[in-house]
């Protein structure tokens, strides 16, 4: 019983103490009012006191408690503090970043929208910062709260497009590809499950448009991957996006049109090598997708590729039929 009273004293604050307990103790005069554990730990972080990683571990533990729900004001301060370590370009160890990431995942249990909005801002940011653990946190959020993530798909796709434009190779690229694949696999499962779609028609179209733009941004920007590990990551992401895009008839047609564009002999493409790499990524990714290329598109692609091999490029045969 004494231990229980001590714990109540440690965790008690407005909004954190159970209502019945606050009612019983309303008549008591206590000075000062004990601060809740989250506030105390946040203060330690802000004052740079003690082991920062340990403070994060304690925060994660407290935030996972069933009765822990810090007020929004405290959450805003906590998000600002944690984000500094999560996105710092240098001077912070990976173990510290991971601890900060775990705090955000634990905080999302009660303040999911606030955490997700913070991560979306980091994805779209153009200033110098590390996005590796922002992406890792997005992945962990989807693993823990997939149904809640579905409503943030179009925002996440737009943010990932910013990452594609900034990253060219290495671990961050591979993590970004893993996030794309994870979220797309989740969207595909959701669409095929027969559950009522959480998106209005206009928002659903916005999701497909953002996915369409992300798809071709990945093909254009990551076609020059030198490392085999990078290449396989890109292929996995492209295949996952294709598997969603090809479910919608309108976007299915657009995908085939873009595929034809990559081999069109009349396009003024200066770097045919890059064009060939894009086509290779596209076609290899299709190996993992259940949809077959329509026969007329397949014939047009093979004919156009054969024509380029023969050297009839770029516009010597403008009347060459495609499709």
Image: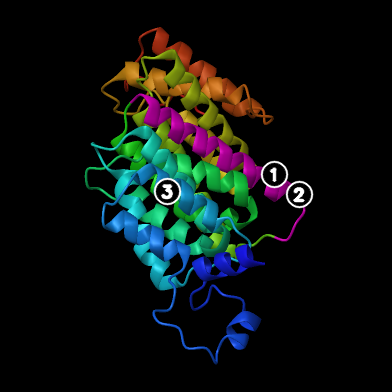
Position above or below: 95 against 249: above
Q: Residues within 10 Å of mark 2 (few under 14, many from 20)?
A: few
Instruction: Name the residue at 47% across, 53% down.
Output: 59
Name the quarter where the N terminus is drawn. Answer: bottom right
Q: Which residues are magenta?
A: 169-196
Q: Position of residue 20 (x, y in %)?
A: 65, 82
- Looking at this rendering, what residue extends furthest in the front direction? 2
Report the number of discs: 3
Q: Position of residue 160 (x, y in %)?
A: 41, 44
Give residue 36's mark.
Answer: none
Which residue bears the numbered disc 2? 193
**Does residue 174 show up magenta in the picture?**
yes
Nearest-to-viewer mark from 3 and 1: 3
Instruction: Name the residue at 69% across, 44% down.
Output: 189
Q: Position of residue 129 (x, y in %)?
A: 26, 42
Which residue bears the numbered disc 1? 189
Which residue bears the numbered disc 3? 56
Q: Between 299 and 22, which is closer to the camera in this rendering?
A: 22
């Amino acid at each position: 019983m004494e231990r229980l009273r001590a714990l109540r004293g440690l965790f008690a604050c407005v909004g954190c103490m159970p209502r019945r307990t606050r009612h019983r103790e309303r008549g008591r005069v206590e000075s000062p009012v004990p601060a809740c554990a989250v506030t105390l730990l946040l203060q330690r972080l802000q004052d740079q006191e003690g082991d920062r990683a340990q403070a994060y571990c304690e925060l994660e533990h407290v935030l996972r408690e069933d009765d822990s729900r810090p007020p929004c004001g405290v959450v805003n301060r906590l998000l600002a503090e944690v984000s500094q370590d999560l996105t710092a370009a240098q001077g912070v160890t990976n173990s510290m970043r991971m601890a900060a990431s775990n705090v955000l995942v634990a905080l999302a249990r009660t303040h999911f929208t606030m955490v997700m909005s913070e991560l979306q801002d980091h994805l779209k940011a153009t200033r110098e910062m590390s996005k590796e653990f922002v992406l890792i946190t997005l992945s962990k959020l989807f693993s823990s709260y997939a149904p809640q993530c579905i409503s943030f798909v179009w925002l996440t796709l737009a943010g990932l497009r910013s990452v594609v434009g900034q990253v060219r190779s290495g671990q961050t690229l591979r993590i970004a590809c893993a996030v794309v694949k994870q979220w797309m696999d989740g969207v595909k499962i959701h669409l095929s499950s027969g559950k009522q779609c959480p998106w209005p028609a206009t928002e659903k179209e916005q999701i497909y448009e953002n996915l369409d733009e992300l798809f071709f941004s990945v093909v254009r920007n990551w076609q020059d991957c030198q490392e085999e590990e990078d290449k396989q990551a890109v292929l996995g992401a492209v295949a996952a996006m294709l598997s969603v895009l090809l479910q919608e008839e309108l976007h299915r047609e657009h995908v085939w049109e873009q595929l034809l564009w990559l081999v069109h002999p009349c396009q003024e493409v200066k770097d045919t090598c890059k064009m060939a790499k894009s086509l290779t990524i596209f076609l290899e990714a299709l190996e993992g997708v259940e949809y077959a290329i329509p026969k007329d598109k397949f014939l047009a692609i093979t004919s156009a590729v054969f024509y380029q091999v023969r050297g009839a490029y770029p516009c010597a045969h403008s009347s060459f039929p495609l499709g």
